[in-house]
Amino acid sequence: MTCTDASGAGRGWRGRVIHRLWIRKCSGVVGVSGQRPAEPYDGTPVAALRRIAFLLERGRADSYKVKAFRRAASAILPLPPEEVAAAAAAGTLTDLPGIGASTAKVIAAAVAGEMPERLAAAEAEYGAPLTAGGAHLRSLLRGDLHSHSDWSDGGSPIEEMAMTALELGHEYLVLTDHSPRLKVARGLSAERLARQLDVVDAVNDHLAGSGFTLLKGIEVDILEDGGLDQSPAMLERLEVRVASVHSKLAMDPAAMTRRMVAAVRNPFTNVLGHCTGRLVTGNRGTRAESRFDARAVFEACAEEGVAVEINSRPERRDPPTRLLELARDVGCLFSIDSDAHAPGQLDFPVLGCERAEAAGIESERIVNTWRKSRLLDWARP
Ligand SMILES: [Zn+2]
Ligand SMILES: [Zn+2]
């Protein structure tokens, strides 16, 4: 058997390691269980840990359940595979920082070429397709315009989001962490955003040749007067801007309409994020739609070439169907986004695709079916 090593040792960068494709196989190792032969597994321990985390996130498991797996993957990623194998053989994996009993079991099984029980369980519980529909439109999507990292309220580092998007086959992912006023979500000041842009450049340098690009973006708060919560100079430096309402969601409908139309008319706005702000399910409870003159807002979107977001998060399903159909009839562009706050949630867009297909929205009107060059031309102010 071969050991095709690609275990993912990448170059160090800001104390973290960005990894290339972690699909190196290392097999031919004698099983450790000593019982009935386990199902074979030909991935690396890092791949096993990441796959478990991905599946849990995709299934919207509590983030504390996911953290141990992501932490363990980060812990062993920089280590030479022989060192991990030696620790597994000696039963000393839990001596390594970041490795607990359950993650050690996953690593030991993967090193031995056996399917980790935890991974098999996660595949069984969360591995099924998220929905029956939407597959054709999903196959036409080239990227995702709305995602968060641990720089704001996401759960994973930028490079992990990028790597997962690449693995999902995306050509691009727009990193859209929150803007300063959203303090509960650790919104980025202009200074932090400027630093983040350097990190995005570094990630792209590392992924050069992969065919994937991490794009510079923001989910910028729409202020009460319709202004955008970031300086024009910073907005200018970005490639795609999603503008969303996160505060005063229950304001008077006429004022909300003025607020949203003003934001849509702002030349920097490319996408109107989760337009009603509703929550239909989930552990944050439910929340009613904001009230506004949807026709006026969507007509402004159509005139300005701003895409109405179809937010794929299961607890949002925003816009509601009647508004999705109105935006369709008004002639709007759309963007089908994950609004992922964890890598596994980057798989959500099929849910939005299912809704767009049901509404009969042509793929040509969905901006993230476009190639990157066309998307960037469209998004330029
Ligand atoms: Zn948002
Ligand atoms: Zn968001």
Image (cartoon, rainbow, N blue to C red):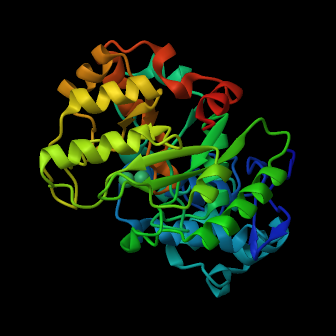
Residue 204, given in percent of the width and then of the height, sits at 78, 50
Residue at the image point whose x is 26% and y is 44% from the top = 258
Is 328 displayed left or right of 287 in the figure? right
- In the rendered view, tell whether residue 215 sits above or below residue 60: above
Residue 90, given in percent of the width and then of the height, sits at 72, 80
Quadrant in which the N terminus is drawn: top right
> In this view of the protein, which residue sits in the foreground, 50 or 43?
50
Residue closest to the far bottom: 95
Is 27 displayed left or right of 216 in the figure? right
Residue 279, given in percent of the width and then of the height, sits at 21, 50
Q: How many numbered marks does the figure carry?
A: 0
> In this view of the protein, which residue sits in the foreground, 337 or 63?
337
- In the rendered view, tell whether residue 202 sits above or below residue 311: below
- Is residue 105 at all visible to an observer of this figure? no
> In this view of the protein, which residue sits in the foreground, 253 or 22?
253
Quadrant in which the C terminus is drawn: top right
Residue at the image point whose x is 44% and y is 55% from the top = 228
Quadrant of res 84:
bottom right
Residue at the image point whose x is 15% and y is 53% from the top = 287
Is 214 displayed left or right of 55 in the figure? right
Residue 146, given in percent of the width and then of the height, sits at 49, 46
Quadrant of res 334:
top left
Residue at the image point whose x is 59% and y is 35% from the top = 379
- Is residue 374 at all visible to an observer of this figure? yes
Is 85 displayed left or right of 93 in the figure? right
> In this view of the protein, which residue sits in the foreground, 182 or 311?
182
Quadrant of res 7:
bottom right
